[in-house]
């Protein structure tokens, strides 16, 4: 049996060659299901370890190193890879202390080719677009998906089309989409509405949708889990903590971890904690009522990458939390920007949404959900340069309603050794 698409609600199956994003029968979300029995005799820790450091396409990619578990049937000449992944896993004591735990690892997905984890999904999705023979690909985006789509579409010779909301786009992300040559359309509507518009346009104009409703994107993104386990010598941590916006990443993590466990590649399932911004927390609210009901909301947060009030992958994220006995937490914009300042000052750096991971760990430790001795991996989703405005505004103390607790003030000096010397001697250096 090859891989198939399967509805998570009614279990109806469809061939992977069909251009669908949700179940035609019931509207449920689709999973790419692989033949785990066949895989069991094929893959092992040693099998994947033997590809580490490979120079050969496509196995030099941190996504396609796991091709058998991502898209086993795709002919390599259809794969569009930069190559992505192979991101670093940092261990930092200062940040562990800040979070309140002994052992903290940070997986930096901002080290992908366009600066966010979206590249792992995009290589999966754009490669599938080539399998399907689609010439145009599109997404609605808070920024990073469009940057990634624009790059991968250009690389593959496909036309990229991106719909932005017309305000609060981080400049680094918009610049990338424009530079990579995608058709950039600013729509007078928020992200949640833009997603609807893209879905409608795609059927009318025969365009392939690359938002995270696309299950082939999630297949790429789940490799973040594969890489982490491999970097930890296949010893699963106790917790994986990540920000949640449209909830594609957390959904992908749940599926990926379950597959690793089913195949015997890890001996226990880490618990997934999804962190939302307080002003964009529909999953957290649903978690509070035991997932008995879900309400969408109007979203507001400085972490624009997760400024989403009606997450498409809600049912899959619930499943991921339930599968792994996970948790959902919320953090304020203040907590996000303070955690970001700490992560940045450690020399690692990330964009605002990414800092939810560390802010969330800190909160879950305070609440006693994460215990001090547990091993935790936080996901940093985007690069520090993505949202330079938020960073500079924080350090200048210019963010409305946010106190810049860890501001690094920029000094001005006249052209004189004495003036500069006075400044340097006046600086109090504290190790991050
Ligand atoms: C897309 C994105 C997120 C949110 O991920 P979801 O899969 O939509 O939950 C978080 N951080 C950054 C930097 C992103 O680009
Ligand atoms: Zn269905």
Image: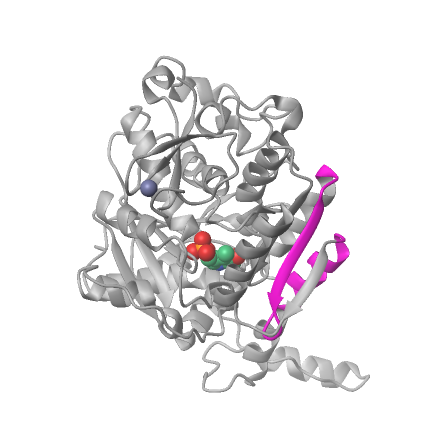
Q: Residue at x 26, y 44 (%)?
A: 238
Observer-nearest of 346 and 428? 346
Q: Is residue 166 magenta?
A: yes
Q: Position of residue 274 (x, y in %)?
A: 33, 56
Q: Position of residue 78 (x, y in %)?
A: 64, 27
On-image quarter of the N terminus: top left
Location of residue 27 with respect to 1 vertically, above or below:
below
In the drawing, does residue 369 fall left or right of residue 145? left
Number of marks in the image? 0
In the drawing, does residue 128 fall left or right of residue 270? right
Asked which quadrant contains residue 227, the reply is top left
Furthest-right residue in this view: 415
Q: Is residue 386 magenta?
A: no
Q: Is residue 106 visible?
A: yes
Q: Position of residue 250 (x, y in %)?
A: 38, 49
Observer-nearest of 376 and 200? 200
Q: Residue at x 25, y 48 (%)?
A: 374
Q: Residue at x 65, y 82 (%)?
A: 423
Location of residue 368 with respect to 252 vertically, above or below:
below
Asked which quadrant contains residue 312, the reply is bottom left
Q: Is residue 115 visible?
A: no
Asked which quadrant contains residue 401, the reply is bottom left
In the drawing, does residue 42 fall left or right of residue 119? left
Observer-nearest of 58 and 190? 190
Furthest-top residue in this view: 41
The stretch of residues the image draws in magenta is: 156-181
Q: Residue at x 41, y 77 (%)?
A: 334
Location of residue 285 with respect to 236 vertically, above or below:
below
Q: Position of residue 335 (x, y in %)?
A: 39, 73
């Amino acid at each position: 049996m090859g891989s198939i698409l399967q509805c998570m609600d009614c279990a109806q199956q469809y061939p992977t060659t069909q251009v669908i994003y949700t179940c035609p029968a019931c509207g449920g979300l689709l999973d790419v299901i692989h033949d785990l029995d066949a895989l069991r005799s094929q893959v092992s820790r040693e099998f994947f370890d033997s590809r580490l450091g490979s120079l050969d396409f496509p196995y030099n990619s941190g996504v396609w190193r796991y091709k058998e578990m991502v898209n086993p049937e795709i002919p390599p000449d259809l794969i569009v890879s930069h190559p992505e992944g192979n991101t670093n896993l940092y261990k930092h004591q200062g940040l562990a202390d800040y979070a309140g735990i002994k052992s903290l690892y940070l997986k930096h997905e901002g080290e992908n080719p366009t600066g966010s984890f979206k590249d792992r999904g995009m290589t999966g999705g754009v490669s599938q677009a080539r399998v399907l023979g689609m010439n145009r690909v599109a997404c609605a985006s808070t920024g990073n998906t469009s940057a990634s789509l624009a790059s991968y579409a250009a690389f593959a010779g496909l036309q990229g089309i991106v719909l932005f909301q017309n305000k609060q786009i981080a400049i680094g992300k918009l610049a990338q989409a424009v530079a990579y040559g995608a058709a950039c359309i600013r729509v007078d509507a928020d992200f949640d509405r833009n997603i609807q518009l893209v879905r409608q346009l795609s059927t009318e104009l025969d365009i392939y949708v690359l938002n995270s409703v696309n299950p082939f994107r999630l297949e790429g993104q789940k490799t973040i889990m594969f890489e982490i386990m491999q970097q930890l010598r296949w010893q699963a941590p106790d917790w994986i903590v990540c920000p949640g916006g449209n909830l594609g990443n957390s959904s992908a993590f749940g599926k990926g971890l379950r597959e690793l466990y089913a195949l015997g590649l890890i001996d226990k399932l880490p618990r997934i904690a999804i962190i939302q911004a307080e002003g964009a927390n529909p999953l957290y609210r649903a978690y509070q009522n035991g997932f008995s009901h879900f309400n969408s909301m109007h979203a507001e947060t400085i972490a624009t990458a997760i400024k989403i009030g009606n997450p498409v992958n809600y049912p899959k994220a619930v499943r991921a939390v339930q599968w792994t006995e996970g948790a959902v937490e919320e953090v304020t914009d203040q907590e996000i920007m303070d955690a970001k300042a700490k992560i940045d000052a450690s020399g690692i750096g990330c964009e605002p949404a990414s800092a939810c991971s560390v802010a969330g760990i800190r909160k879950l430790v305070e609440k006693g959900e994460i215990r001090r001795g547990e091993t935790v991996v936080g996901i940093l989703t985007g690069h520090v340069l993505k949202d330079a405005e938020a960073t500079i505004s924080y350090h200048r103390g210019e963010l409305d309603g946010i106190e810049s607790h860890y501001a690094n003030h920029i000094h001005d000096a006249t052209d004189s050794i004495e003036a500069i010397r006075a400044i340097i001697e006046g600086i109090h250096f504290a190790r991050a």
